[in-house]
Image: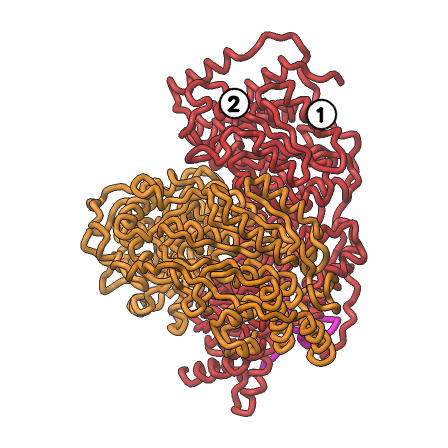
Chain colours: A red, B orange
Amino acid sequence: MPEPSLAVLHNLATQLRIDSVRSTSAAGSGHPTTCLSAADIVAALFFAEMRFDPHDPHHPEADRFVLSKGHGAPILYAAWAAAGAFPREDLMQLRTLGSDLEGHPTPRLPFVDVATGSLGQGLAAGIGTALNARRIDSDYRTYVLMGDGESAEGSVWEAAESAVFHRLDNLCGIVDVNGFGQSRATQYGRDADAHAARWNAFGWHAIVIDGHDMSQVLAALAEARRTKDRPTMIAARTLKGKGCSIFEGKDHWHGKALKKGAEEDQALAELEAQYVKTSDPAPVIPKPARRRDEGPFPDFVKALPAPAYKLNDSVATREAYGTALAALGGIDARVVALDADVKNSTFSERFEKLHPERFYQMFIAEQVMIGASMGLAARGAISFPSSFACFLERASDFVRMAGISNVNIKLAGSHAGVSIGEDGPSQMALEDLAIFRAVPNCTVLYPSDAMSAERLVALAAATPGPAYIRISRPKTPVIYSVNETFVAGGSKTLRQTDRDAVTVVAAGITLFEALKAHDLLAPDGIAIRVIDAYSIQPIDRDALVAAGRATGGRMVTVEDHYSHGGLGDAVSDAVWDQGFRVQRLAVRKIPRSGPPEVLLDHFGISASAIVNAVKSQVAGS
Amino acid sequence: MPEPSLAVLHNLATQLRIDSVRSTSAAGSGHPTTCLSAADIVAALFFAEMRFDPHDPHHPEADRFVLSKGHGAPILYAAWAAAGAFPREDLMQLRTLGSDLEGHPTPRLPFVDVATGSLGQGLAAGIGTALNARRIDSDYRTYVLMGDGESAEGSVWEAAESAVFHRLDNLCGIVDVNGFGQSRATQYGRDADAHAARWNAFGWHAIVIDGHDMSQVLAALAEARRTKDRPTMIAARTLKGKGCSIFEGKDHWHGKALKKGAEEDQALAELEAQYVKTSDPAPVIPKPARRRDEGPFPDFVKALPAPAYKLNDSVATREAYGTALAALGGIDARVVALDADVKNSTFSERFEKLHPERFYQMFIAEQVMIGASMGLAARGAISFPSSFACFLERASDFVRMAGISNVNIKLAGSHAGVSIGEDGPSQMALEDLAIFRAVPNCTVLYPSDAMSAERLVALAAATPGPAYIRISRPKTPVIYSVNETFVAGGSKTLRQTDRDAVTVVAAGITLFEALKAHDLLAPDGIAIRVIDAYSIQPIDRDALVAAGRATGGRMVTVEDHYSHGGLGDAVSDAVWDQGFRVQRLAVRKIPRSGPPEVLLDHFGISASAIVNAVKSQVAGS
C-alpha cells in the first residue's frame, strides 16, 4: 500500500483538532489543548503507521495504542471515528451519561485496552501489551502516547527500566512535550532534549523531533520500527493548543473547553482554514496479517491437579500459592506470572522454574508489575502478579484502575498481618483487604490452609475480572480434605452445634485462633460456631445470616488486619438488616516487631482475645 | 577538629560489621549482608562526616541520616550505639517485643526521622528534611543511604527529579551497589556507572566510587559538600556481605542471619581479624554549632481568623480549604504546603501566593510529595500536601508509612466521589476514606460546607499526627454559622424531633442529599434525624448511639464513596454492640461520566435513594 501523503495526514490532523474542539465545547468541559498538541502524532499513528481493523479493535494481533495522557480522550475518540470505528457525529455525545465516550477512556470502548486518566500508567500497560506480543509470537507493535507532565510520575521510570530489561523493541513511546502541566509550566518546559537524555540514560533509543512536522513524526516512527533490542522513546516538541490562536502555546488553558459561540467559532474557523487542497488518495489502514484466536479458557478449577496434602501437614499458604500457580501455568499458556524480586518469599519461583518464558521479573517496582499485568490481561493473558501484600499497596492506584479496566489480573499478597512477626510494621499488610475490597468488581479470597489455598488460586483464575488472594507467611496445618470444594461467595462452617452461643467468623491465620478458642471455651460449656470466610468478597451472606440467627445475633469477627475495611466490615455489611451485634477483633494500633504468636495476642486477635469476647458477649446477653 | 584516621574508621566499620552479625544471629533473623556492604560508608558518615549529638538526636540543626534501605537497620543501630547514643549491649535485643530496635527502623527511636523498610521512600523523605533546612535557614545536611535494588522503585526517580528542581545541594544520596536484590541479581548488577549515568541525566552530580575504599568514600562526601546548586549521588560499588567469606559477594544470602554456633563464630573470627592496630585518636563527632528551637505550636483552632461566609453562600469546600490553608500559613511559619500540579483545583495556590517560600511544587509525583511532607514534618514542620483524592492513592504506601512514622502530615484530597461528574471514574476517589481510615492514628475529617471546611483545616493542624481532609469539587451552601465549633470525634445533629423514625448519617456532599430527603419525607409524616459526621475518624460514638436508640435502631448512612471502609463501616463499627440496623447507601459499582446530580441518583446516594431507604426501613419495622 502506498503511504498517505503529507497533505492527507495534515488534513486528518486538522480534522482531529476540529473534532476535539467541537466535542469538548459541546460537552462544556474537557481538554482540547492537550488534544491539539498531539494531533499530528495521532494522525501519523492511526493513518500511516499502525496496522489495525477499525471494525475489529480486539483483533489479537492488531497494533496497540495506549493513550497514557487519558485526558486527551477526545482526540482518541476522534481518531477512531475518523478510522471508521463509529460515526463521527457520535463524538458530540462526549461525557454524557448515555455514551461510552467518557471524560477519560475506559475499556467500555472496544478500542481501549486499559483505562487511563490516572497519569503515568500507560507505559506500564504498554509493557504488558508488548510482552503479550512475545507471548503469542506476534509482531504487533505497541505505541504509548504520554504527556510531559506525567513523566514526573515514578511509575513512568519503573516502566522505563523494565522495558529495557525485557528488550522490548516492539514498544514505542511518544512523549508530547508541550511544556505545560495543569497549573503551570512543567519542570523541563519544552526542552525535549532533557526528556530524551533521561530516556537514553535508562537505555532507550531516544529521538527528538518537532511534533508538528509530519515528516519528522513519520521518520521517527520508522526509525523506532528499525531499532532492535531496545524500546524507542520519541520526545516530540509541541505547542499545547496548536492551531488555535486563543490558546496555542499559552499557560492556564489546561482542561478548559472553548465556550460555545464566538470562542468556539473563532477556533473552528482558524482550524478549517488550515485544510490544504489535495487530490491525494485517502489513507488505507493496513489490517493485521492473520488472526489466531486462543479460544475459551479451560475450567481451571476442575483442571487443577488434586493437591497432595494430607490433613495436618504444615504448609504455608504462600507456598501452596506457588505450587498452584505453577500447576495453572501447565494447564493454559495464557497464565503468566510477574514478580517484584520476592519470588522466593511468595514461591512464585515455582512458576518460573516450569514456565520461565511466561515469568516476568519486574524487580522492586510494584507499579510497573501491576501495570504490565493489566496490559497482558487486556490482551488475553491471565496475569498473576505477586509480592508482599504491603508492597502491592505501593500500586494501589494501579489496582484502582485495574478495577475500572475490569481486567483478568489476579494479585497475590503474601506476609499479611502481624503474624509475620519480627520484621515489623513496615512489612505487615494490615490494610490490604480494605484496598482490594474497595474495588467493587474484585474477588477477594483468603485461604487458611494449603489445600484451600490451591483451590482458591484456581478459583481466582476461573473468576472473570480482578481478584486478590491474601496469603500468609507462617506455616499452618492442613484442615481441608482433597474433596472439599470452594466457591466465590462461599464459606465453611467448621464447628457447629445446636446450642452455639456465638458465631465466630475468621479467615486465614485467625481461623486457627478461632478453632483454639472453640476448644478453650468447651470446658466452660460454651459452644461457638466457627466459620471460615475464605471468600471475603463476595461474602457468604446466607451462611452468615443463618449462623447469626442461630447464635442470638451474637457474632465475633477476627482478622489479622486493621479494624477498617476488612473481614469485620464485610460481615457487618452483609448482615446489616438483621440487627446482629458484630464485634470486630482486629488490629487497632500501629504494630511492632515481635514473635508472631506474641503479636497475635498483643494486638487482640488471638484465641484468648476471642475467648474473652465470646464470654463478654454471652455475659452481656 | 582533626579528621579521624583511615585506620580508626576502618576499625569502626569492622565494629559495625561485627555488631550487625551478632545482633542478627542473636535475633535469628534479619539482614546482615546488606549491613556489611554498607559498613564503610556508614562508618565514614557517622564518624568523619556528619555533625550531630548522639545524646540529642532531635537537635533541629543536626545533620540527618535516612536509612532508605531499612532492612539494614542493624547497622544503623550499631552506628548510633558506637556514637554513644545507647549501650552497645542493647543491640542484642534486636527484633524483640520489648525493644525499640525493631526489624526495620521506626521513629520510636529518637534518631529515626521517618520509618523505612518499604523500599524507595528514603530519598523522598530526605528531600523533606533538606527542604526543612532551607525553611529554618540552617546549613545542616541530609544523607540518604539507598540500596541498588530499591532504585527500581519509581518513587526514587520522582525524588531524583524533585531534588534537582529544588536545587538541593544540601542533599547527598549514596546508593550501595552491591548487585543483589532479595531473589536474584539486580538489573544492573554491580555496574555503578550505569547507576551514576541515570542520576547524571536527571541533573544530579554523580560520583562513582569503590564503597569499601575509605579514602574514596571520604573524598566523595567532601566533593558532595563542595557541590553547589544540585544534589549529589554517590554510586558506591560494594560487595554484599563484605568481610565474611561465608556470604561475601554471594547470591541467595539476602535476609538470612548466620546461625548461632559455627557459622556465626567463623564470621566473627574473620571480622575480628580485620581490626588493625592503631594508636590514632578516637573520632570526635562535631556537634551542630547552634540550637534554635521553634517553640510550641500556637492554638491553630483559636488563631484561625473567623471565616467570612454568610449562611447560604455557595462555596466549594476545596476553595475553603485553600483559604484556610493560606491563613494557617500566616499564623505559624512551620505550616508548609506541597502540590502535585493541581494547586488551581485544590486552591492551595492561595497559600503559594502568600507564602511562596514555603510552598513546594512537586509536579505530578504524589509519592515524593508525601514523602517530602513526611521529612518536613519529622523536622518540625506541619505539612499540607494536597491533590485530587484519587491521586493521593498513588502514594498509599507512603501514607501507610506516614502512619507508622506518626508525623504531622495533613493531607487534603479534593474531587472526592462521583459528584465530580463528567471527568469520569479515573478522577473519582471512592476508596480514599478506606485507605486513610486504615491508618489507625490518622484523623479523618470530611467537611460539608465552607465554614466547617475552614474550621476542620485548622483542627487538622492542631491535632498531632497524620490527618486527612476530604474535600469536594461542587459548590455547596454554607449551613454553619461562624459560632459553630468542630472537634475531632464530634458531629452535628442538623434535624431532630422526638418522633424521628430513622437516623440518617451523612458527610460532605451527601449531607445535602440527607437534608433534601428530610424535606421530601416530611409531607408523608416521616421525620428523620440528620447527622453530619464531619469527623469520620474518630467518630462520635455517643451521638450515634443516642440517635440510633432514639430511632428504634434504624440507621441509614449515605456517602459518596464505595460501600467499603468508609462512613458506613465507621458508623457500624462504632455502634456494633447496639444491635442497630445500619444500612449503607454507597457507590457499589464502577461509576462513569455524567452530570454530578444524575450520578448521585444513578449510584444510589441521592435524596431519593435516602427517601426509599427510610421508607423501606420504616415499613419493615
Q: Nearer the viewer, residue B386 or A416?
A: B386
Neighbour tally class for label 1: few under 14, some 14-19, many 20 plus, Cα within 10 Å: few
- The magenta stretch spans which residues? A472-496
* Residue at numbered disc 1: A222
Image check: B434 left or right of B27? left
Please give the name of the residue rendered at 44% of the width and 29% of the height, measured from the top-left corner. A27
User: Secondary structure under badge 2?
Assistant: helix
Provide the chain ID for the residue under circle 2.
A
Report if residue B236 lies within the magenta region.
no
Expressed as whole percent of the image width and height from the top left, the position of residue B166 reads 45, 43
Report if residue A479 lies within the magenta region.
yes
Please give the name of the residue rendered at 72% of the width and 37% of the height, measured from the top-left corner. A230
Sequence-wise first label, 1 or 2: 2
For the residues marked 1 and 2, what is the alpha-carbon distance in whole angstroms? 27 Å
Please give the name of the residue rendered at 75% of the width and 29% of the height, measured from the top-left corner. A226
Residue B308 in sight from this viewpoint:
yes
Q: Is residue B220 above or below residue B258?
A: above
| Residue at far bottom of view | A523
Task: Say whether mark 2 and mark 1 are on the same chain.
Answer: yes
Q: Which mark is residue B569?
A: none
The picture quadrant where one finds residue A107 is top right
The picture quadrant where one finds residue B577 is bottom left
**Labels in figure, total:** 2
* Residue at numbered disc 2: A19
User: Secondary structure under badge 1?
Assistant: helix
Q: Is residue A319 above or below residue B344?
A: below
Identified by mark 1, the residue type is Ala
